[in-house]
Structure formats: structure tokens, C-alpha cells
Amino acid sequence: MEKRTRLKLISEMPILKAFADNWENVVQFQAKADDLLICTYPKSGTTWMSEIVDLIRNGGETEKSQNKAIFDRVPFLECVGSTMPSGTELLDKLDFRRVIKTHLPISILPETFLEKNCKVIYVARNPKDVAVSYYHFYRMSYRHPEPGTWDEFLNSFMEGKVSFGSWSSHVKGWWKMRQQRDILYLFYEDMQEDPRREIKKVMKFLGKDLSDEVLEKIHQNSSFQAMKNNPMSNFSTYPYMDQSVSPFMRKGICGDWKNQFTVCQNEKFDEYYRREMSDTDLSFRM
Ligand code: A3P
């Protein structure tokens, strides 16, 4: 069983030690023009979007989504582990129309994706819910450092001292990039509010004109409950997680931060948010 280790820095960004040690393979990775990147800061709805894209690609049919784990259907570029193929190894075996998950900020995304003009779907989520979700993820995903108390973790989050670094730099960096590139920038809160509307945006972005019946199938099969019940989507077959500590498909709601933040933590966080977001027109619904 792999152990908790300290994070390592890649271009000043903290990341799991195993990922940092494998970084050369990520740098050398060759993108293809028909690759689709699903990019997020961790805990922002990556798996949900991956399932939606996979279902759209398969016309709503669940044959694949119920027979192959989500981390094999949508390989995680920078991921590596001792008991499974790395993201780049999985991707190198796929010939075409690859869907790739990454948590990399735009500042260190390998150039190859920009050179090949790959399409990108970016999903952002309000930072209070991200922080709570990330805390519980740190507890159960035991290759991360010990999260410490919730208060300690929240401070680390605000200081950008968690895996993949600063939340604000991540969401702002990709937000800026969306004006120059083929990027569909979506929000977890919008997906919660009206999943059909957001799935339609993804369909349009992928050039798919599917019937309302298929849309409904995609909607049903990518719901929180359907994904929680699907062993191929709920990470129950993934090593390096102890789901008895906290399930990967945890709550899947907006505003869970209200159950976790104290009044004092919330005031401090609002101050952090104001400071970090003062130089952007990007804003979040909490
Ligand atoms: P919570 O911990 O708040 O429940 P990621 O895939 O980026 O790691 O994000 C994980 C978060 O997305 C978790 O949030 C998880 O429950 C939530 N999630 C996953 N699938 C979902 C779905 N179909 N609908 C709503 N939320 C979902």
C-alpha cells in the first residue's frame, strides 16, 4: 500500500510526489489534434464532466460506461501509480478521439496541447465547496499528505499549499485563456441548476446534434445517484483510496460548505476571495 508523502514542487506548483517524479513523461507527451481535454482544479466536477462527455460520444448508450472504469475511459494525464499504468501510458495506447483529464493550470500545461489546438472543456466550482470536497478527498485519498484539521487544511488551501496549488490562479488562468482558444468554460453550479442545459452546451461544443431522447438518457446516466451506483464511475475499483473514510461520490451538492465553515472561517475566506478575485471579471455563486 502506498503511503502519504509530502508534496513536491513542479514549477512552483505543489503536486503528489509520484506525479512530480513522473513529470518528464508528461512534458514529453504528444497531443493529437482530435484530443479533447477536460480540465479542472481538483474536486470541481471532473468525473461528472468525464461521464457526460463519454456518454455523448457513445450516443447515450451505457455499454462502455458500465464496463470500463472512468479512469480508463478518460485517462488522467499526469497520474501515475505503482500498481497501474500511468496516464500517458494509457493515452499512448489510444489511437484517436482521446478524452484526457488534467488538473494542470494553464501555466504548465504542455505546449503540445496548444500547438495542436486541442479543444478544452474547463469546469470551475465555487472555492468554498471545492475546499470542503478537497478536505474529505485528502482524508480518503491516502497518497496525499495528512490534511490536518479542517482549519489547518483550509489555511493551506488559501495559501495554495495543496496539490495543484492555487485555486484562484487556476480558474483565472483558464478564464483568461478562453478568449484566445477553443475552450468551453462551465460551472459546477450551473450543471446542478440545469444539467440538461449544460449537457446541451457540451453537445454543441462537440458538434453533436442528439435527440431529446438521447439527451435524457445522458442526463439520467450522469446523475449523482446513477454515478454513485455505477462501480465504473464511483472509483470503487481505484487503488489508493479508502472509501470507508469518505466516499468519492460524497454529497454532490452546492453549498455544503455551510455545514463545514465556522462564521470566523467564512469571514476569513470571503476576505481571501475578494483579494484573489479583485483583478478578474470571473465570479462564482456560492
Ligand atoms: P463532493 O465532495 O462535494 O460531493 P472531481 O470529480 O473533480 O474530483 O469532483 C468530485 C466532486 O464532484 C465531489 O463533490 C462529487 O460528489 C461530485 N460529483 C461527482 N459526480 C457528480 C454528479 N454526477 N453530480 C453532482 N456532483 C458530482
Image (cartoon, rainbow, N blue to C red):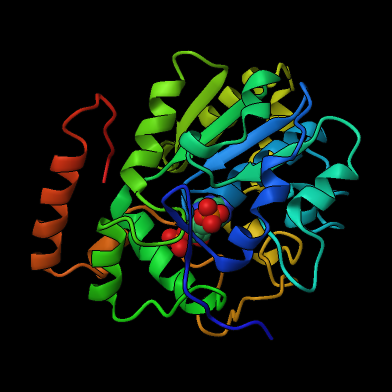
Q: Nearer the viewer, residue 96 or 54?
A: 96
Q: Position of residue 87 (x, y in %)?
A: 74, 52
Point 11% across, 58% down: residue: 268
Total numbered badges shown on the rendered structure: 0
Q: Is 85 left or right of 253, judged from the image as shown?
A: right
Is residue 124 among what the camera can see?
yes
Which image quarter: residue 205? Answer: top right
Q: Position of residue 195 (x, y in %)?
A: 52, 37
Q: Is 265 left or right of 191, judged from the image as shown?
A: left
Point 80% across, 54% down: residue: 72
Q: Position of residue 215 (x, y in %)?
A: 68, 31
Residue reaching furthest to the top = 180
Is residue 217 among what the camera can see?
no
- What is the quadrant of the N terminus in the image? bottom right
Q: Nearer the viewer, residue 23 or 94?
A: 23
Q: Nearer the viewer, residue 169 or 274?
A: 169
- In this view, 3 is above or below 6: below
Which image quarter: residue 147? Answer: bottom left
- In this view, 130 is above or below 205: below
Q: Position of residue 204 (x, y in %)?
A: 64, 18
- In this view, 190 is above or below 73: above
Point 83% across, 51% down: residue: 90
